Amino acid sequence: MNYLSHFYIHQKPNDPYFNAGLILPDLGRSFVKTFKEVLINPADLNLCAISNGCLQHYEADKLFHGSEFFKWGTLICTEELKDLHFNNVVEKRWFIGHILFEMLLDRLLVRHQPQVLTDFYDQIQLADLNQIKEFFILSKVNRKEKLLQYFNHFRKVQYIRSYIDTNLFVYSLSRVLIRAGLPALTFSDRAILEECVKRMENDIFKDAYHVLLRLKKVF
């Protein structure tokens, strides 16, 4: 799942450290192998909350990726991508379909349940950077200062808000592909994908309430 979907499913009201932990495994993927084995003093409640959020993230991803809902959505997106006539070579469409489906779930939340997005950013803004840094130290994160800057940049820029704009949504997808080692989508190919996203949202994903309800039922 993507950032906002993790929060939507497992958020804890007024627990910014747990909620920050829900997104750290994805933010920290290039910096640390896992946040699963962090030794924390039980008396450090904030650090324990961050750790518990991370563990919840891993458990949620395991359930989600093994679900019929994930297989259904990924297959739909992959088949749609296979039928597109891009102007340039676009490889690993099965992988792009996987990423697209997860990002589309976040986009559905942004478009149809905007309060979830507001609550998400409000919560992670409340997490003190010193506590996050201490958790990174205990986690033996490589380049912990860089990851701390990345976390702070993520919550300040709030780029998930841009998902409501189809052009910026597809641009964000292209950026994800770059980080995964794939070529960026060209301007013309992004335009083709934009039309694909609009078609799917007007057809298969038209009933956002039902799609998000199916997501919840996975857990």
Image (cartoon, rainbow, N blue to C red):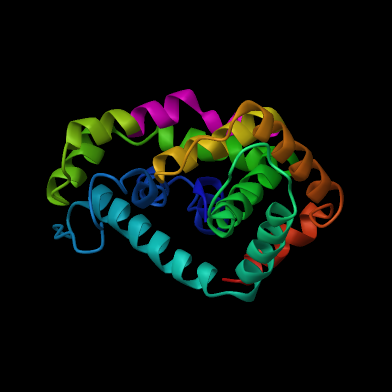
Q: Nearer the viewer, residue 13 or 206?
A: 206
Q: Is residue 144 above or below residue 99?
A: above
Q: Seen in the image, is 64 located left or right of residue 200? A: left
Q: Nearer the viewer, residue 33 or 25?
A: 33
Residue 108: x %, y % from top left:
70, 46
Q: Is 42 inside the magenta-drawn segment?
A: no
Residue 50 shows in the view: yes
Q: Nearer the viewer, residue 197 or 118?
A: 197
The residue located at (59%, 30%) in the rendering is 186
Residue 163 shows in the view: no
Q: Is 161 inside the magenta-drawn segment?
A: yes
The magenta region covers 151-165
The residue located at (56%, 71%) in the rendering is 219
Residue 138: x %, y % from top left:
13, 50
The residue located at (67%, 45%) in the rendering is 109
Q: Seen in the image, is 70 located left or right of residue 213? A: left
Q: How many marks?
A: 0
Q: Seen in the image, is 54 located left or right of residue 132? A: right
Would you identify the image quadrant in which residue 178 lies?
top left
